[in-house]
Image (tube, rainbow, N blue to C red):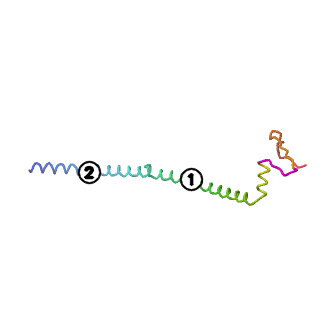
Amino acid sequence: MGAARLKEMDAKEKFESLLKHYGPVLLGLLVLVLVVHDVFGTHGYLAMRRTQNEINKVEAGLEQLNKENLQLEQEVRELKTDPHKIEKIARDELGLAKPGEVIIKIPLSQHLPQTPTAKH
């Protein structure tokens, strides 16, 4: 039993020696792996920044859509209540006219170029 105990002590001493020798290196590697994972991992710093940028873009898009929605609501309100707005659309987009009026349409190709000129 003495030889078995001696081998056991010898193995334990070898393990402790290896641990003392390589322990700090292993601990350093473990810390390095954890830091790399925290920076580059799936839920790391870079991924969180990327996600935050996407959230900011979506919020900006949502804000733009809300503004557009408000403008459209205003336009709907005007179309329901403002007869002049309805008349303007009927004249400009539908080409309608009041009785006795004549509409003359000039093709775009015949429009004169509008260049800024000095006043005479």
Task: Residue 72 in the image: state x and y as whole percent.
Answer: 68, 56
Q: Which residue is tagged 1?
A: 58
Q: Which residue is at the far right? A: 120
11 or 46: nearer the eye?
Answer: 46
Specify whether 54 is left or right of 92. Answer: left
* Secondary-structure class at tag 2: helix
112 or 51: nearer the eye?
Answer: 112
98 or 19: nearer the eye?
Answer: 98
Q: Which residues are magenta?
A: 94-100
Task: Residue 76 in the image: state x and y as whole percent.
Answer: 70, 57
Which of label 1 and label 2 is nearer to you? 1
At label 1, which amino acid type do we have? Answer: Val
Q: Which residue is at the far front? A: 99
Q: Which residue is at the far left? A: 1
Label 1 crowd bin: few (<14), some (14–19), many (20+), radius 10 Å:
few
Q: Main secondary structure of the magenta part?
A: loop
Residue drawn where x is 50% and y is 52% of the image: 51
At label 2, which amino acid type do we have? Answer: Leu
* Secondary-structure class at tag 1: helix
Specify whether 12 is left or right of 108. Answer: left
Q: Is residue 80 above or below residue 47?
A: below
Q: Which residue is tagged 2?
A: 19
98 in magenta: yes
Q: Which mark is residue 25?
A: none
Rounded to the nearest angstrom, the CA distance separating label 1 from label 2 is: 52 Å
Label 2 crowd bin: few (<14), some (14–19), many (20+), radius 10 Å:
few
Specify whether 70 is left or right of 2. Answer: right
Work out whether mark 1 precedes mark 2 in sequence or the reverse, and give the earlier one: 2
116 in magenta: no
Do callouts 1 and 2 mark residues in contact (Cβ within 8 Å)? no
Q: Quadrant of residue 107?
A: top right
